[in-house]
Image (tube, rainbow, N blue to C red):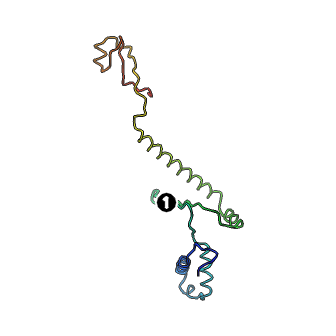
Amino acid sequence: MHNPDRPDQSPSQASVALERMLGQMDPAIARSFTESQREALQASLASTLWQNHAVDIRLSIPLLLQRYYLVVVAGPEKRSRERRQQDQATRSVSGQMVVAVAVTALSLGVLAVLMQLTQHQTGNGDRPKPSPAAIPFLGDRSTCEHSGRTWENGECLDFEHDPTF
């Protein structure tokens, strides 16, 4: 049965949901519904089916020995004020905290990946050039050059010095 109040719901979605629900019941009870009862159940299910959203992101995340899912949806609010209040009352504070921690952890993970990608793209070209450092304990040219350094203006200079060291 198609619900005219919900134009974005197809009759087949509601009938599939009804068949799934009836399939989970004892077969004798499922057969006991009259046609008008089935139509009423199908109409009720049609109003609770998942809607299309402007943003619909679904992730399946393997953690340890189980998989967890994360769904992020966004779009215009279509629920009544009473329905929003009822939904809010049924959600526990601990559940909201879990969601907040998960979203924060996911955001930090994405940020870390983006920072890593940015660092790899820029490479070493953005690093400052090594600044020469004078090596005071190498006071003569031959000892300085023998150590792999450069003798300039009476000083032994090390050009491998890293300014971020």
Q: Is residue 92 above or below residue 110?
A: below
Residue at point 61%, 79% (across, down): 43
Residue 80: image location, x then y, percent? 69, 67
Instruction: In the rendered view, tell whether residue 29 sits above or below residue 131.
Output: below
Which quadrant, please, contains the C terminus? top left
> Would residue 24 be seen by someone viewing this image from the given angle?
no
Which residue appears at 53% of the width and 50% of the height? 107
- The amino acid at mark 1 is Leu
Quarter where residue 143 is shown: top left
In this picture, residue 67 sits left or right of residue 137: right
Mark 1: give few (<14), some (14-19) or many (20+) Cα within 10 Å.
few
| Residue, disc 1 | 59
Placement of 46 over or under 131, stated as above or below? below
Which type of secondary structure does the marked residue at label 1 adopt?
strand
| Residue at image point 70% right, 64% down | 85
Q: Is residue 147 above or below residue 87?
A: above
Seen from the viewer's position, the closer of residues 78 and 132 is 78
Counting from the top left corner in percent of width and height, residue 120 is at: 41, 41
Specify the quadrant that holds the N terminus: bottom right
Q: Position of residue 144 (x, y in %)?
A: 31, 16
Along the viewing direction, whichever of 100 and 79 lies nearer the viewer: 79
Work out whether residue 89 can be spotted: yes
Residue 32, position in %: x, y? 58, 88
**Residue 149, quarter of the rendered image:** top left
Q: Residue furthest right?
A: 82
Q: How many marks?
A: 1
Q: Quadrant of residue 91?
A: bottom right
